[in-house]
Image (tube, rainbow, N blue to C red):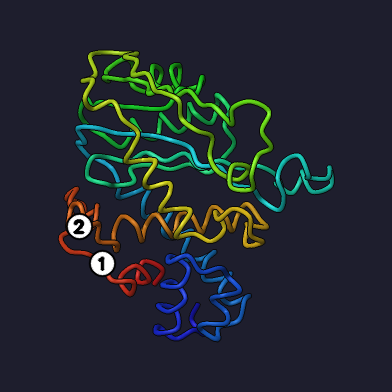
Amino acid sequence: MNKLSLDKKKAVVACLVDGASINATVRMTGVSKPTILKLVRDLGAVCRAYHDTHVRGLKPERIQTDEIWAFIGAKAKNVKPTKAIEGWGDVWTYTAITEKKLILAYRVSQRTQEDSDEFMLDVAGRITQRTQLTTDGHTTYLNAVANAFEFEVDYAQLVKTYGGSQGNEARTAAEKYSPPRINGARKIGMIGLPETKHISTSHVERSNLTMRISMRRFTQLTNAHSKKISYHANAVALFFSFYNFCRVHSTIETSPAVASGLINHVWSIEELLNLAD
């Protein structure tokens, strides 16, 4: 990163966190692809370490969690055995967001019981008071939450039911590539006494949409998907640091890190880059 000027670094990061692909960033900034990938690798690793150390000791009143799907190299059904050992296939990113829009924890992994256990342990380890937690109905969550919080949590699930096209109508292109229609949702208290009015996953689902819009590798039906799991994880870490510390959210009129008391002003991209110095 020492060979790249500060202005060029700022331009590259600004492009990447605003939805540009690596190749588009090359065209817009004039920075070579290997140099951009090295910046993502190095800065992403630093951002992940900073998040792990500093996004702790918080007292959120409410937390919502969800998972967002992507793939490395190719979708799982199309991955050849020789590529599977390189990490190609489906990948999930767990996210946990507070009522102040802070991404409290995230995990790039599969969607197994072990992954849910590790994710919930991470969430529980970052807070210092009892909170209300809402997840979707994924079957691994109940045990993961009970083990991580030792039942000292007010936990509920928002379980949605889905439906597709009626009858035998041919599906249009829009229907084929759109999310399934939501037919209804049930709010189910699982542990403690969660308040019904706060059983929701709308905030975390909205942040997941922001991820898809702002990280090109999450955009579906393009060739901008990640080719290596390591770069995917580093890009996620870089984006979430920008999201927490640099991005002003209209509903709270500041950055989530400021609203949560982690920092005293909204960071510039230059300050984010300073983490790597």
The vertical placement of 132 against 146, above or below, is below
Q: Is mark 1 on a helix, strand or loop?
A: loop
Which residue position is annotated with label 2? 263
Q: How far apart are marks 1 and 2 (CA)?
A: 9 Å
**Which amino acid type is marked by label 2?**
Ile
Which residue position is annotated with label 1? 267
Asked if residue 78 lies left or right of residue 266, the reply is right
Image spot of residue 124 (x, y percent): 33, 30
Asked if residue 265 lies left or right of residue 144, the reply is left
**Which amino acid type is marked by label 1?**
Trp
Q: How many labels does the image show?
A: 2
Residue for point 20% across, 52% down: 251
Residue closest to the eye, 149 or 77: 77
Disc 2 residue crowd, few under 14, some 14–19, many 20+, Cα 10 Å: few
Quarter holding the C terminus? bottom left
Q: Using the image, tell me which numbered label, if any, was put on residue 55.
A: none
